[in-house]
Image: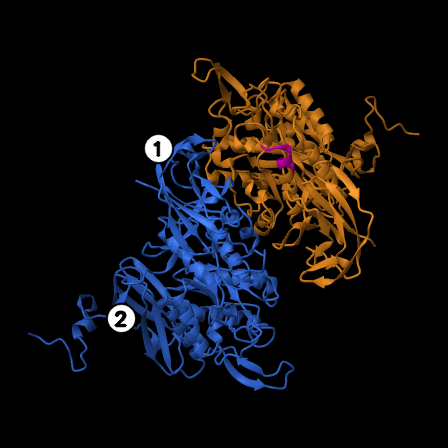
Chain colours: A blue, B orange
Amino acid sequence: MINTFGKKGICWICMFFPLFCFSQQKIEQWGRFETSFNYHYNGDAFTDVDITATFINGDSSITVDGFYDGNNVFRVRFMPSKIGTWTYTTHSNIRALNAKRGSFDCVKASGDNHGMVRVSNTYYFKYADGKQFYPVGTTAYAWNHMSKGMQQMTLKSLKASGFDKLRMCVFPKNYDLVKEEPEIFPFNVLNVDSATETGQHKKWDFSTFNPLFFQTLEKQIDALNSLGIQADLILFHPYDHGRWGFDALPMTVNIRYLKYIIARLGSFRNVWWSMANEWDLVKAKTHSDWIKLSKYVYDNDPYHHLCSIHGTTGTYFEYWLPYFSHASIQDEAPVMNWGAASILRDAYHKPVIYDEVGYEGNLKNRWGRYSGEEMTYLMWMGAIGGTYVTHGEAYKYYNGNDTIFWAKGGMFRGTSWKRAAFLRKILEADPAPLEPADISHDFKTAAAGDGDYIIYFGKEMPENWVFNIPAKNGSYPKPVAGDKYKIDIIDTWAMTITPVKDVFEIGKEVDYRFYGKNRKKIWLPLKPYLALRVTKIN
Amino acid sequence: MINTFGKKGICWICMFFPLFCFSQQKIEQWGRFETSFNYHYNGDAFTDVDITATFINGDSSITVDGFYDGNNVFRVRFMPSKIGTWTYTTHSNIRALNAKRGSFDCVKASGDNHGMVRVSNTYYFKYADGKQFYPVGTTAYAWNHMSKGMQQMTLKSLKASGFDKLRMCVFPKNYDLVKEEPEIFPFNVLNVDSATETGQHKKWDFSTFNPLFFQTLEKQIDALNSLGIQADLILFHPYDHGRWGFDALPMTVNIRYLKYIIARLGSFRNVWWSMANEWDLVKAKTHSDWIKLSKYVYDNDPYHHLCSIHGTTGTYFEYWLPYFSHASIQDEAPVMNWGAASILRDAYHKPVIYDEVGYEGNLKNRWGRYSGEEMTYLMWMGAIGGTYVTHGEAYKYYNGNDTIFWAKGGMFRGTSWKRAAFLRKILEADPAPLEPADISHDFKTAAAGDGDYIIYFGKEMPENWVFNIPAKNGSYPKPVAGDKYKIDIIDTWAMTITPVKDVFEIGKEVDYRFYGKNRKKIWLPLKPYLALRVTKIN
């Protein structure tokens, strides 16, 4: 028998006939292939060296940017989705980095790897493997800029929660409630001028990046991924106020930054791009700058990660533009009262996430002083309208014994975060995403599949409920007289699900609705925030 | 003295030096200039003869289509806006109609002529002369297809009303509540086949138009203009059901029809184009057909009349397209509960008219059985959100003593039409159009100018009201402590305006609001549908 392995254990068959060799590297679908090249470049490797790689598998060909990771290391990352052997070739203006070839096998995803989240059926989300995704997100804008201990606490809190999406900023935050100076920055410091009025003032070298910062960010995003959490990564924000100047970079630096972050993070399957938080507060960027930056990401992200942009209250961007996969909205108006949440589905024909509707907390600001009940109510009001509401928590205690999760991460102090997990459980138990059953007429009933409904009573406290469902049934067929249903009473606050023993058979359609025979009813506890799960019995 | 007038009283100076002659035709701004040419064309004058005219006044040059009006008459119409002498030259593929020249003087508008209505300040409307326009419209889809007597009754009803916009269809309507066969049609009948299942069945000559139909339509639109009413002219609709086939014309005929109607009606200053009613129910046209047709109107209407398109409940078109000046929406969800009306302003950044939110009436259909109170409430809910709600009335009596104004016109039988006039009076009395004062936070208070507010309580019955206004004030400056205000109590149902004697001085800002000193309050009658007009005293 011929030994195909050399002294270093490298299979020479692999080297020359990689397609036929079983020992070649295996990468799961939506996993991350990475290769690196050592090269000492005399000059600015960040700006002068171009490196891309084209990955080919059958008729699929995808070209990605590589990047300089410091210490004479250039890397190329790639996230495959198609199973089979991928071969790649690099292209570079540096001979030593050019025409490098290699390959790997993409194998079926396993375990909790469901792939990237994509838009599904206009208004909803699915993982690439077909599993439905319901964004039940929270907010910790600057958790990644806090101390390591605090970061660990945040991850622990998230693990114990039911959140599957986290809004977080790449750039550090300088805001009333977040003043901590980070240890590392995305750019390198040229010099520190301590004479300015604002105290310590750093001068930056915007022609280079600080690889350590991005390596750390990558670990943070991977840590979120291991918890099943999508990183809704905010690429720009206005909360700088002259401290570091990251909100007012020259446009060429903005673009270089986007190119670099896409090269580094494009292969992270749990990344979403949020072009900005409160884009309209970023004084250094015009509306047309935002269009340009959004278009850049759309044109240059080979994976088309989910992408949106977020403004101040009621300031919506042009979410119909192809650059945006969904609407990421700041506005409480659509979820405070009945029937308004769905309106923006009808307007944009895209998924709608109300990424800020105000937060649970005790701040003096009105956006940060909802009760846990109110925050929970708003999340449900979004859900019942076929949309999604992002949670946030902003408790600031007089004893300083707080972390303000919304800003810094840390520990949850409130009550709604547990109810968010309960909501997610309810959503995931339904056969299909909620959609208004009888649009603009019945604001309380969502179709949750064929013969499945969620009915939410909000702040109302009906003493009893006569079985009734609308004749219109979203995208599903009309109910049929004689259909039988069972009911669970859901207490969205107490987080209980109580099955009702009775079975309900519907009669003929009466005035756009079907009622239980003999107007059969159930009695409800006299409490607000109740919902019903109505399920057809086959 | 030289007599410059010949035998026929034609001034030869005018003929050769029209710019210097005072006796030349005078047309008001936004009035209608018309000239006609007699020519016998051997063939189909509708399809074979092209005639356009270019009108020039200084650096303004506008080219309009002429049209064949039957009986060997070709006409060219033009609506000038710029004051001064306009000269024109015709262009035609028929020599006898080509290179015809003439001129007229455009003089300042007078009386009730305020010009075309335009979009103003993103969300609102103004006449061309700067007067604010508030669309307080109603609906009489097929009034123009009814008997002459009925048409006169409709005009009389409209005259007695306060409506300033009317939704009406060019094509006749074949619907449950409107079955009348019109006397005249836009196309000529080729032959009548009475053997079909649907009874009398006309075969149409779609290569020609019936000028009499359009002449009649023009008189109807002029009659509306003389009442100060905008004709929101519905160019296509689905209510045909195989009876005439006007919903399923070949695309070439659709375009020829649009060209013809723009040539005839473009010069009518009170025309708005509504591309369709319930476009999504027109089975013969695809979404892309609607885009094409809308683009055609936008590209070919030299005046850019206001234009929108209207779908079924919750089915919104892409109102962000440049073809549409405003959103014409069918949906009650945005006006049934607090805070939802403004959402679509924020989405589209265009004026929003809820052209159907359901109607006052007693039909079994849920869209036609609101009380007068409910219809009035919905109109006010739109207004307080900085949008506009169109009225409609659909009473069907068992004794047949009804006209169903919404369908046929005739007489108003309900109660909300008078309240619409009252609402218009309130809107017109305000210094500026209503806009949300504190978006997404205070759903009841609209800024109505600098220091002017309308506060609407809807169905609530507050016993008293502590003077308070939001610190945020739409596009106006914040109130200042010490400002003094007076109040009128408006009963939107009883249509009364009751001044409050007291003057209210505001203190310092407290938690996003300004309160009257000593929390001074007013007592209110225990009734729903009240509003307040709050006016700063200078």
Is residue B128 placed above or below A59 in the rendered structure? above
Query: Residue at coordinates 45% horizontally, 69% vertically from top-left?
Result: A259
**Dot 2: few (<14), some (14–19), or many (≥20) neighbours within 10 Å?**
some
Query: Residue at coordinates 43% horizontally, 58% vertically from top-left?
Result: A135
Tell me, yes or no, whether the highlighted magenta stretch contains residue A11.
no
- Pointer 1 residue: A482
Badge number at residue B216: none
Please name the predominant secondary structure of the magenta segment in the image. Answer: helix
Badge number at residue A102: 2
Given residues B343 and B21, the one toward you in this image is B343
Asked if the residue under mark 1 is in contact with the one under mark 2, i.e. CB atoms within 8 Å, the reply is no
Kind of residue indicated by mark 1: Gly
- Residue A241: x, y in percent? 60, 73
Chain part drawn in magenta: B370-376
Kind of residue indicated by mark 2: Gly
Tell me the quarter of the picture where residue B95 sits.
Answer: top right
- Residue B108: x, y in percent? 80, 39
Residue at disc 2, secondary structure? strand
